[in-house]
């Protein structure tokens, strides 16, 4: 019995061992014309195996590239596309630089910090006041998503003032949306904070009380 660990390594496992054996056979064909014909047949088989991707742009070129990769770039055939090289395959992609953004309050996120900056940059007027009120309620919504048991309107006001560098100050008579109203408009907040509500325990207590009552009636 032959185990997979004793077999040759599969260059691209998604095509299976039979395709790899076909490629190895093609590499041993001496006649170039015959080798080209076999290569086309193998590409057709590879296309049937991954037929779900046939509508993707550059699909056929990808199959030919995979053919050369499976042969470890030893297969000498005429390709309708530029042949890939082992060096290009081994080349590592460029590192993607991460944006080094420091977020003071992570439960608000980068988007809210960006909105605070834009609001602070607006000239004083009705537009800025309206934007600031909507932003304050949005910050409260984000805070509730993180912890709905300890939200305080004064805390949100202080955070808005702090994130804006003291440029955004709500009027003293400003009233936030109530917590119940925000939760009603955002059901995900309620479902995401079930562990804080104690509803599950209450349900268990009711079931226990009901069972005890049934036991009393039974005896």
Image (tube, helix red, strand yellow):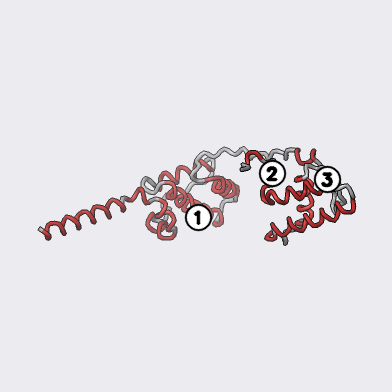
Image position, residue 75 (x, y; %): 83, 45
Residue 134's mark? 1
Q: Secondary structure at mark 2?
A: loop
Residue drawn at (59%, 49%), measured in percent from left and top? 118
Residue 137 image offset from top left, x and y in percent: 46, 53
66, 158: nearer the viewer: 66
| Among numbered discs 2 and 1, the one appearing first in the sequence | 2
Q: CA distance from mark 2 to mark 1?
A: 58 Å
Looking at the rendered structure, the secondary structure element under dot 1 is: helix
Q: As drawn, which residue projects farthest toward the front? A: 1
Q: Secondary structure at mark 3?
A: loop
Q: In the picture shown, does residue 203 fall above or below 9?
A: below
Residue 5 picture location, percent across and down: 63, 39
Which of discs 2 and 1 lies nearer the camera? The answer is 2
Can residue 18 be seen at all in this image of the molecule?
Answer: yes
Q: Residues within 10 Å of mark 3 (few under 14, many from 20)?
A: few
Is residue 175 visible in this depiction of the protein?
no
Q: Does 26 sit left or right of 132 as displayed?
A: right
For the residues labelled 1 and 3, say whether their Cβ atoms are less than 8 Å apart.
no
Question: Residues at badges 2 and 1 in contact (C-beta under 8 Å)?
Answer: no
Q: Earlier in the sequence, mark 3 or mark 2?
A: 2
Give the image location of residue 101, x and y in percent.
Answer: 59, 39
Q: Which residue is mark 3?
A: 28
Given the current orientation, which residue lies at the most extreme bottom position? 55
* Labels 1 and 3: the sequence-earlier one: 3
Q: CA distance from mark 1 to mark 3?
A: 72 Å
Instruction: Specify the farthest residue to the left.
Output: 219
- Provide the residue designation for mark 2: 10
């Amino acid at each position: 019995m032959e185990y997979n660990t004793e077999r040759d390594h599969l260059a691209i496992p998604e095509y299976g061992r039979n395709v790899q054996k076909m490629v190895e056979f093609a590499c041993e064909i001496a006649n170039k014309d015959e080798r080209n014909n076999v290569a086309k047949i193998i590409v057709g088989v590879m296309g049937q195996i991954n037929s779900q991707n046939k509508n993707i742009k550059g699909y056929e070129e990808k199959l030919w590239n995979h053919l050369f990769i499976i042969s470890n770039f030893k297969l000498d055939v005429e390709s309708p596309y530029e042949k890939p090289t082992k060096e290009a395959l081994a080349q590592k992609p460029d590192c993607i630089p991460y944006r080094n953004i420091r977020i003071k309050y992570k439960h608000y996120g980068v988007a809210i910090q960006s909105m605070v900056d834009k609001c602070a940059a607006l000239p004083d007027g009705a537009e800025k006041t309206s934007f600031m009120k909507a932003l304050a309620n949005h910050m409260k919504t984000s805070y509730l998503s993180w912890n709905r048991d300890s939200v305080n309107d004064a805390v949100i006001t202080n955070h808005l003032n702090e994130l804006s560098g003291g440029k955004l100050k709500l009027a003293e008579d400003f009233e936030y949306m109530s917590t119940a109203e925000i939760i009603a408009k955002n059901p995900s907040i309620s479902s995401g904070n079930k562990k804080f509500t104690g509803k599950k325990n209450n349900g268990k207590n009711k079931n226990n009380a009901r069972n005890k009552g049934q036991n009393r009636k039974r005896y």
